[in-house]
Structures are given as structure tokens and as C-alpha cells.
Amino acid sequence: MINLKQQAGIAAANLVQNGMKIGLGTGSTVFFALERLAERQKTENLKFSGVSTSFSTTLLCRKMGIELIDCGSVSHLDLAIDGADEIDPKLNLIKGRGAAHLLEKIVASLADKFIIVADSAKKVQHLGEKFPVPLEILPAALGLVQARVKSLEGILEIRMAGACKDGPTISDSGNIIADANFGLIKDSPALGKELDSIPGIVGHGLFIGLAKEAFIAGEAGVEHISF
């Protein structure tokens, strides 16, 4: 039986048309979108090319036979499909638990339409309810970023890699991943601008005004939100 997360992924994948260039995100619901796209290639002879936002997604696309092109070679995408860690009522997001938020934001910004697929547990009234804001930081700027985050009343914690690797989590681009806890974020656009202004933050996990559509799986079915 198709579950609701599958339905959300399938609904987004069904928006892809022949000849499109699309961004392909990361996560359990995005996985179902990738499965559907691979199926449509076989059953409908759908022709498209994708830009991956993480090495894990790249490996899945290779396994499924989805053609990929290098992100640096494109200046425009027709749409992008990705997940989120938190989603507020205006479709502002926190992303980055998978440490891929820099490339995810680049891909989202390239797309005419940025579509979120997720489950209803990701919905919040205010960003910061459940998760801190991930930051990707140049190693040489770590002290500066720590001081600036503190001045914004945030608590910065370097994300450690865990049992399989000593030391901090390192992004695919070779930068340090840290998490900044600001508590409930009442003005996420303002905080996003403050973080944008800090030298050494290569990318942060606040996605403000980028998502225009979402398919969210919940107990009652798949909710479609569009702005």
C-alpha cells in the first residue's frame, strides 16, 4: 500500500515534464519522488536531467538511472524538489540536518519553482520550535561567527561527526557545520539577513521566501499548499 509520504513524493514528481532541468533534494520523502521519476522514465519515456544537492542523492540517482548534470554548469532550473526540517505557515523553512543546506539553497535559488515534500511533523508555527539553525562556516571564521551569533542571543554548537569519525561534521564543500540555537524565531526574515551579513558563514539553514509550493503528508491525507 502506498503510504502518505509516498503520495507526497509522487505528487511532486508528477509535476516534472519532458525536457525539464530539476533540482533533486535529500530525505525520506524526496526518496519517493526519485523513485517515481525513475518509474516515469521507464513507463512514460520521460526525459529530464537533474542536479543533485548531496552525495547521498547522487548515489541514489546513479542506482535509479536518473541523469545528473553538474550544478556549476547551469544557471536555471525549471523546478526543485526537496524536504525540510521545519516548515512555518508561510513556507519559510529550516533545513540542514543533513549538512547539505548550502548546495540545497543554491539549487532552490536556481529554480523557477521550489517544491517541498515532507510529513506533517515538520509543520511549526514559528521556526526554531524543534531545531536550531544549521550553519556552514569557513574554518578560519569560526571565532568570529561564534561571537556574532552570541551577539544575536544565539548559542552556537559545532556539530560533531559521531562514532564513525573524530572531530566536527564537515560539509561536502569542506567547511565546518555548526548549529545555532535562537529559540523561537519570531522574525525569521530579519534573522536570515543578520546571518547573511556575517563574514565566514558560507550558508545558513533559514530558507526564507524560497518555497512556493508544498505537499505535506498527514493523517488526513496529503495537504497541498501553494503561494
Image: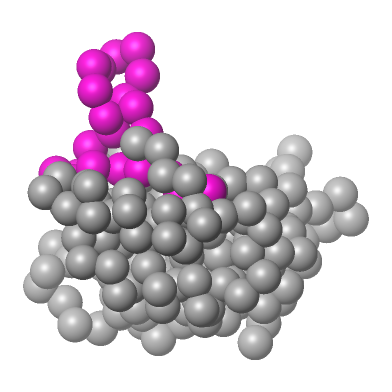
Task: Name the residue: 73% across, 59% down.
Answer: 124
Residue at 28%, 68% in the rendered image: 198
Q: Nearer the viewer, residue 213 or 125?
A: 125
Majority secondary structure in the magenta region: loop
153 relative to 89, above or below: above
Check the picture and name the quadrant holding the N terminus: top right
> Which corner quadrant of the image does residue 52 belong to?
bottom left
Q: Is residue 192 visible?
A: yes
Q: Nearer the viewer, residue 20 or 175?
A: 175
Side (left or right) of 37 relative to 139: right
Q: Nearer the viewer, residue 13 or 57?
A: 57
Q: Is residue 96 visible?
A: no
Residue at image location 42% in from the left, 44% down from the top: 156
Q: Position of residue 92 (x, y in %)?
A: 58, 72
Residue 42 rendering spot, x and y as whole percentages: 39, 55
Is 156 left or right of 85, judged from the image as shown? left
In the rendering, at what x and y percent does residue 51 appear?
A: 26, 63
Q: Is residue 141 left or right of residue 63?
A: left
Q: Is residue 170 magenta?
A: yes
Q: Quadrant of the C terminus?
A: bottom right
**Percent coordinates x, y for residue 189 in the rendering:** 52, 78
Q: Is residue 149 above or below residue 196?
A: above
Looking at the image, which residue is at 16% across and 77% down?
74
Chain part drawn in magenta:
159-181
Q: Judge whether residue 167 is colored magenta.
A: yes
Rendered view: 56 above or below 114: above
Name the outermost residue toward the right: 220
Q: Residue furthest top?
A: 163
